[in-house]
Amino acid sequence: MITLILNSKNLTLKIPVDTILLWKEKTMTNKLEKPQQITFDLTDRCQMQCVTCSKWKTVPSDVISKELTTEEWKKAISDLRNWLGEGFWVCFSGGEPFLRQDIFELAEYANSLGVKVASMTNAFGIQNLYEKIIDSPIESLNISLNAINNPLIHDASRGRDGSYEKIIDTIMELIKLRNEKQKSLGINIATIMLPENLEEIIPLVEFVTKNKINGIMFQLFDDKESFHGYYYQKGCMTSTYKMPKDLRIQYKNMSKRAIEIIDRLIEMKRAGHSIYNSYEQLYAMKIFFNNPDDILKDIVCDVGSTNFAIDPYGDVRLCFNMTPVGNIKDEKPENIWINSNSEKCRLMTKSCKMYCRMLNCNFKHNFANFNKGFFTKCINKVKKILTGKK
Ligand SMILES: C[S@@+](CC[C@H](N)C(=O)[O-])C[C@H]1O[C@@H](n2cnc3c(N)ncnc32)[C@H](O)[C@@H]1O
Ligand code: SF4
Ligand code: SF4
């Protein structure tokens, strides 16, 4: 196996050449395909107060009557099914999706049409729902957990005391029930990499492996203005966005240790630990920590050709920071996907100045969408290695 070592600004990336070629093949197609990431943000409401997110500021009485009804969500599922065929995944997220009483009914309906359902959760209010979850057609449950050894770190990041305890109870009870009932629910952990929880990252992977949790995915913490409820806030000004100074300092201060930890994650993934982030994404995270601005040059955000996200009020976005491209109540999804708003949005993503392209949901096939310049740099280097030139 030939390994390419890219040294740039104090950063060493050891990337196997076959990875680069596969990576290029997967990401460099210009043809517009159908979306691969379908998200239903069932509600903006949430009972936590995460320091990284502002969705919880949504006042329930302002929004409940504005949210799509059960029947409207069902229609969205059926319209998508007619367009995309069987077997695609829809992810229920939010806000906290389990605050919607009809979440199981929607999952049943999706399942009856051959649509696969995953859900994110903060696991704070689902303690009386374990049996229901295990027996439901939800196939994959992603539970957000930011620490394992130090409960205070998790609770501080989520803004609520006692949330760590509830999550651990949820994970253990779901694993037990899954075994007893011989069910196949995928139980996964979703962790944000924060300045405060870096020393928790490796123990979290060990916890996942030890307890036969299906896997863990990491994501960089992003500007909390990106994680906004849709009722009050439309998004950030993507074309003129400047990373806030304090956020830049936070990234800088954690960068050295973060890069060491990501290297360790790459080794652990190679050794068989179930870390969902692709190697490519882990390399991209290293580039980011080395110098966040390099990501703006090297990675093209691909949400315009992969994401189809419906907010609690039916508005559809390709990018969660840009204005909606349509509303699912008024237009069929296949028409929204190719309408002029979507075209305009796709153009705007190409010149976007934001860093949320690093988030998991923005990675096409979980591959970092590196741009042509980056590949040219890699491939020229491979040619030099093969021809013996330095
Ligand atoms: C917005 S939440 C919605 C689902 C659910 N409420 C939860 O927390 O799992 C989806 C994921 O985004 C993560 N998240 C929140 N704020 C973030 C930020 N600023 N940067 C990156 N991820 C963030 C959460 O930890 C969670 O894993
Ligand atoms: S990250 Fe999830 S749990 Fe935290 S405030 Fe946002 S929506 Fe709620
Ligand atoms: S980086 Fe991507 S997801 Fe983030 S604001 Fe820009 S286009 Fe949207």
Image (cartoon, rainbow, N blue to C red):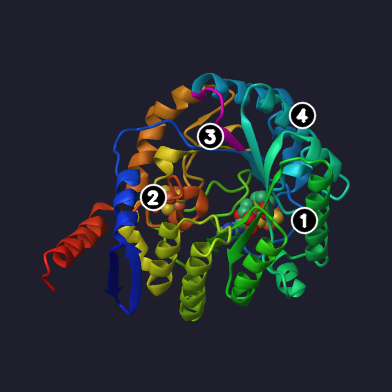
Q: Position of residue 228 (x, y in %)?
A: 60, 52
Q: Determine the image quadrant of residue 88.
A: top right
Is residue 328 visible in this depiction of the protein? yes
Disc 2 + disc 1, Cβ < 8 Å = no
Horizontal arrangement in the rendering, residue 160 relative to residue 252 (left or right):
right
Tell me where the magenta segment starts and ends, as one range: 84-90
Q: Quadrant of the N terminus?
A: bottom left
Residues 263 and 299: in front is 263
Q: Nearer the viewer, residue 45 or 384?
A: 384
Q: Mark 3 points at which residue?
A: 316
Q: Are the residues tagged 1 and 3 within 8 Å (C-beta)?
A: no
Callout 1 touching callout 4 (CB < 8 Å): no
Q: Is 230 above or below relative to 158? A: above
Instruction: Give the residue drawn at x 71%, y 22%.
Output: 71
Location of mark 2 (residue): 301
Q: Is mark 2 within 8 Å of ligand 3?
A: yes
Please tell me whether mark 2 or mark 4 is closer to you in this view. Answer: 4
Say which label, 1 or 3, has the lower sequence index. 1
Which mark's residue is nearer the viewer, 2 or 1?
1
- Say which residue appears at 28% left-offset and 74% top-offset: 8
SS label for mark 3: strand
Identify the element where label 4 is drawn: helix
- The answer to if 234 sits in the magenta stretch is no
Residue drawn 81% across and 67% down?
161
